[in-house]
Amino acid sequence: MKHAILGAGAIGGLVGTALSSLGEDVTVMVRPERLKSYPPNLTLERPSGTLAAPVKAVSSLAEPPDVLWIATKTYQLETALEVVRTLPGCIVPLLNGVDHVAALRARFGREHVVPGTIAVEAEKIAPGRFIQRSPFVLLNLASSGEPLLGALIGRLGNLGFTCQFIPNEQTLLWWKLSFLAPFALVTSASGMNIGGVLANPDWKLELSSAIAETCAVANASGAELDPLRIRAGFDSAPPGMRSSMQKDLAAGRQLELDAIGGPIVHGGERYGINVSTTAKLMADIRAKAVAQ
């Protein structure tokens, strides 16, 4: 199949390299000023070894790919979509948060959008060069994508990806957010990695409270999540793991704070759920960002 990657950062690079290494036809969309110097091969350093695979680079998408993988930051999405001048057969967004799915379906049609989530610690270290720091890649897709993507997802499993098709889209989207939001908010507010958070009784309590709030809003939204299972996931996480938001905050970059924490706060207001821990963490992070 022909694949296009919108968002050539850590996640887009990881997915693009993996797909191309399997022999898939992969095109990466980059800014016009970077097109000439973009490397002809993607390189992904993984705990299990290095993958290198060929790629085409373009500045706009004029011909429809079979699959468009979107891996931009949430605040970049609207601008990034301006270079998509055709209707892809299938669109798989791997963005943080939940609100982007409705926006994409309003633009491209419900039947073309297959919601997805990915959980991995990865970084872009140079154009076309990426590093996967976590030992895992968890890729989940809505079951509506299984007829087209089932065989491909099985082949990604051969690369060590853990993949599932999930029937309940709310469970799919909120499952990641129920881990990501508490993780990102607590590590960013504390300045600690997850091992440090779990070793500190006060911050561990903040983490547990944030998990409970997120799961309560998720389940009120139609998801089916067990907060005890989410908490157990943190116990098995690599202790040195840091969130992307934490790294962005330290580097003075724009944060995805509204996309990650916003659905919880808004959901708390909508359903009458106490989300005071999440709201306080968001306020603390905003204050830290302003103070830099």
Image (tube, helix red, strand yellow):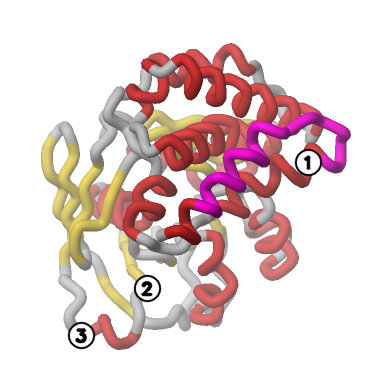
* Up-down relation of residue 266 to residue 240 (above or below): below
Which range of residues does the magenta coloring cover? 269-287
Kind of element beneath mark 1: helix
Give the residue drawn at x 40%, y 58%. Answer: 1
- Residue 116: x and y, percent? 54, 45
- Residue 89: x and y, percent? 56, 63
Q: Are marks 2 and 1 in contact (CB under 8 Å)?
A: no
User: Does residue 38 appear left or right of residue 278 in this picture?
Assistant: left
Residue 272 visible from this viewpoint: yes
Q: Which residue is mark 1?
A: 267
Q: Which residue is mark 3?
A: 36
- Dominant secondary structure of the residues highlighted in magenta in the image: helix
Give the residue drawn at x 33%, y 79%. Answer: 58
Label 1 CA crowd tier, 10 Å (few <14, some 14–19, many 20+): many
* Up-down relation of residue 4 to residue 192 (above or below): below
Q: Quadrant of residue 56?
A: bottom left
Residue 151 visible from this viewpoint: no
Label 3 CA crowd tier, 10 Å (few <14, some 14–19, many 20+): few
Give the residue drawn at x 47%, y 52%. Answer: 288
Q: Are marks 2 and 3 in contact (CB under 8 Å)?
A: no
Going by the numbered disc 1, the residue's amino acid type is Gly
Q: Quadrant of residue 243?
A: top left
